Amino acid sequence: MRVVIADDSGLLRDGLANLLTAAGVEVAARAADAEELLVLVAEHEPDVAIVDIRMPPTYTHEGAKAALELRQRRPGLGILLLSQSLESRYVTDLARQHARGFGYLLKDRVTDVQVLLDALDSVAAGGTVLDPDVVSHLLGRNELVEQLGRLSERERAVLELMAQGLSNRAIAARLVIDVKTVETHIARIMTKLDLHQTPDEHRRVLAVLAWLRG
């Protein structure tokens, strides 16, 4: 897998590049702003672009705007927004209209490199990875908060890992439970969130995607 990293923090760019390189991911280029990101993606044609939302010059939503432009230019490019902030401008369009191969994780929630690697694998394969807090922010719907409130603490943990793109087996390993228990939790989550069952391979992200289609 080849990636381009875009973040205004040189320390974060280098640190992230070193972690990914050590894990076997090829870091093709690093960008300090949105304009440079567009140029480097065109030049290196990576599998995934890792993009911070807030970058120069205004530090508001340059990264998200650039990500939307990249998706329109290269529909097959995986895009993983990795940010400290919750933003909705441009991000909502990405999530609703270009959900395939799209992810949005909060930096504070990426507790170890494996979380990031799992997200990259999912996005590169055309999957969708969304932090539950991101979904709540994008929607701003009271009913979503109410429905998520129906979930037990363990079900919320399972939902969070589902949103990160982890398989049932990976979730079981992360929570130190068996796969059958994970399947039971997922069935209950679907029921509590009023989501229909589906054989689609992206079923584990329905809990977050269904709300973005409304």
Image: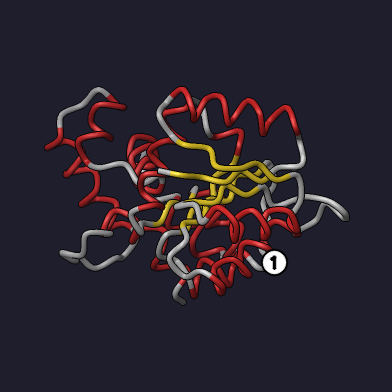
Q: Residue furthest front?
A: 43
Left or right: 169, with 107 as reference point:
left
Looking at the rendered structure, the secondary structure element under dot 1 is loop
Q: How is the image coloured?
A: secondary structure
As shown in the figure, which amino acid type bears the numbered disc 1?
Arg
152 relative position to 48: left or right: left
Q: Does 117 sit above or below residue 101?
A: above
Residue that badge 1 annotates:
89
**Quadrant assignment, res 209:** bottom left
Q: How many marks?
A: 1
> Label 1 crowding class (10 Å Cα cut-off): few <14, some 14-19, many 20+?
some
Residue 173: image location, x then y, percent: 24, 26
Quadrant that contains the N terminus: top left
Q: Position of residue 160 (x, y in %)?
A: 41, 42
- Relative to 85, is 58 above or below? below
Position of residue 132 measured from the top left corner of the image (x, y, whole percent):
49, 49
Q: Nearer the viewer, residue 143 or 95?
A: 95
Nearest the viewer among 135 and 155 is 135
Residue at 58% across / 31% down in the picture? 17
- Name the residue at 55% across, 48% down: 133
Q: Is residue 186 left or right of residue 113?
A: left
* Residue at far right of view: 57
Between residue 211 and residue 116, name the one nearer to us: 116
Q: Residue at x 53, y 38 (%)?
A: 27
**Most distant residue in the left direction:** 180
Q: Is residue 21 above or below residue 196?
A: above
Q: Quadrant of residue 211?
A: bottom left
Place of residue 54 in the rendered image (x, y in percent of width and height, measured from the top left): 75, 50
Q: Nearer the viewer, residue 179 or 93?
A: 93
Residue drawn at point x = 40 percent, y = 48 percent = 163
